[in-house]
Image: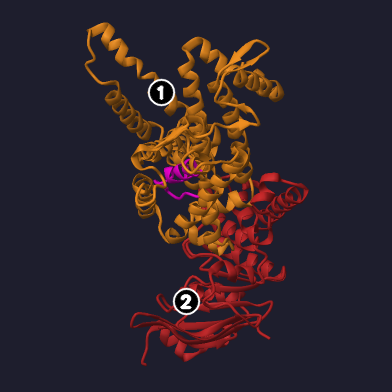
Amino acid sequence: MLDFLRARPRLALILVAVLLAALPFLVGAGLGKSWVRVLDFALLYVMLALGLNIVVGYAGLLDLGYVAFYALGAYLYAWLASPHFGLHLPFWAVLPLGALLAGVFGVLLGAPTLRLRGDYLAIVTLGFGEIIRIFMNNLDAPINITNGPQGMNLIDPIAFGGFALSKTHKFFGFAVSNAHLYYYLFLAFVLVVMFVALRLQDSRIGRAWAAIREDEVAASAMGINTRNVKLLAFAMGATFGGLAGGLFAAFQGFISPESFGLMESIMILCMIVLGGMGHIPGVILGAVLLTVLPEALRYVGDWQRAMLGHVAVDPADLRMLLFGCALILMMLFRPEGLWPSRQRKRELHAADEVAEHESASVYDVRG
Amino acid sequence: MALLEVDRVGKQFGGLAALDDVSLSVRQGEIYGLIGPNGAGKTTLFNCMTGLYSVSAGAVRLEGRAVHNRPPHEVVRHGFARTFQNIRLFANMSALENVMVGRHVCSRASVLGAVLRGARTRAEEAAIRQRAQELLHFVGLERKGRALAGHLAYGEQRRLEIARALATEPKLLALDEPVAGMNPSERRQMAEFFLKLRDSGVTLLLIEHDVKLVMGVCDRVAVLDYGKKIAEGAPDAVQRDPAVIAAYLGGEV
């Protein structure tokens, strides 16, 4: 079946497109409307993971504060399109501004950390993420900018003229809910982000990122301006984060600092690591899995009630436990991720390959 | 005018003078050897010339333009490429990709160009790939383009590093111990390769321990000892210099 499709890429593409278009209806009919919302979130996380993948996967800069850019995009959307300041700018103006703001902050974060690598960079970026969250938490006095821990609500939905995505619309007598509408919007954005990421990866700039990831000194000796290229990676990643943040704010209608904690950053990083760092299909798989699986685990509480009569282990705790175990197992048995690029697989199994080669030649001698 | 002019360069590491008042000049089209005992400051001088170290005193000029205390990527842009003593390839990229990275300075596609991939970007990308293939062919690695750089044999890695440096289209190529760890027949091959490189129009600056190789291929040689230049000239003259013999074999100072 797979070989059949591989030989017919156009047919495969059409099948995937039809499947993606029908997915929210299939999921909605099969599992209920709440699962369509889960799909929407999965797409948002795919966007975030693809953005962080540019920083971590391509350029090899470990960023633990990525959620800060998500927060900036979300807050900018809320400031410019909610009753908080009485501004109601249209989404096509606010989303690019949010992406731009996040991109600028990406450079602001990148500039002082250019000399840092690995663990040190991770700690500084983690601090940056917390700074943004704490600012959002406390900027309700003396001037109320962020409304503090209560967050901001009544944020405008995405609307094309009078067509707001937050309402259920009827098409040919067929009701399409807001979750479905946002699904298609997010899907379109994911496709754009994917396209940009793919094109960048396979370009002069993508090669420069890979070179910096591999050996910064050698990269600079090849004429790569490591400062600019690193800042570019931070800026590109942050831009996608800001875009996702704006979409999140419009979709939820409500944001608060709680949504932008350290755990979110770690989750997004885990999506990349679990899926396959630097490989776009892997990153997408990781993001979808890590959004959908925790939701699925909510059912474990119901099963316990049905079987034991009470909830013995809180599903939320169980989630973290299973999640931790899964990550440990992954690192032991599949450090390259679930769906790595061919190259990365070879990197991490290079030692095996050499060993195999050597033992094979030993057998040759014996034979 | 000399292609490369090192003018009274000094380099201090704290109280230690790694280089002291070193001057040399490399002429267009020659193979210039830099030899000296371990710790004489050869690699330090290389790093000062190529922007990895700042100089404490003096100047380095390439075609009359000062390149000292400039970041490495600018030095490369002026036409001065180098390889490293301990090979520094991008081990997890293919051999071809390694050379393609070297084309960075000779190409200009921006983010927008890369995303839109218009006709110009496509043409540039094709040119990068083609030039990289040619260079792989030039160093005899045309069959290894798809192999990961880290999987190549040692001698192949050395040659790949040279191909990658050549991809920046240098006027002057500095090689830091390019035949270290090679056996005599590999060394002979490399010596022939250096002559071929020179004949293709690249001026070579060579750090080497193997005195025989240096004497065989170099047009001129300078000898460093304890951070000072103690001799410079044609190989056979330098070989007979008492100061050089003393530095290598030990002797009265």
Which chain hosts label 1?
Answer: A
Q: Which residue is mark 2?
A: B54
Task: Report if residue B60 lies within the magenta region.
Answer: no
Q: Amino acid at mark 1?
A: Leu
Q: Residues within 10 Å of mark 1 (few under 14, many from 20)?
A: few
Q: Which residue is mark 1?
A: A293
Among the chains pictured, the one given red colouring is B
Task: Report if residue A66 lies within the magenta region.
Answer: yes
Q: Colour of chain A?
A: orange
Q: Quadrant of the N terminus of chain A?
A: top right
Q: Residue A66, located in which quarter of the rendered image?
A: top left
Q: Residues within 10 Å of mark 2 (few under 14, many from 20)?
A: some
Q: Residue furthest bottom?
A: B253
In this rendering, would B137 be left or right of A114? Answer: right
Q: Which mark is residue A164?
A: none
Disc 1, SS? helix
> Magenta segment, which residues?
A59-76
**Residue lying at 46% horizontally and 35% vertically, measured from the top left:** A360
Q: Is residue A294 visible?
A: yes
Q: How many marks?
A: 2
- Percent x, y for residue B206? 56, 73
Colour scheme of the rendered structure: by chain
Where is A202 relative to A211, above or below? above
Of residues B134 and A297, the one nearer the viewer is A297
Which chain hosts label 2?
Answer: B
In this rendering, would A168 be left or right of B124? Answer: left
- Percent x, y for residue A52? 48, 43
- Percent x, y for residue B109? 68, 54
Where is B164 relative to B9, above or below? above
Q: Amino acid at mark 2?
A: Ser
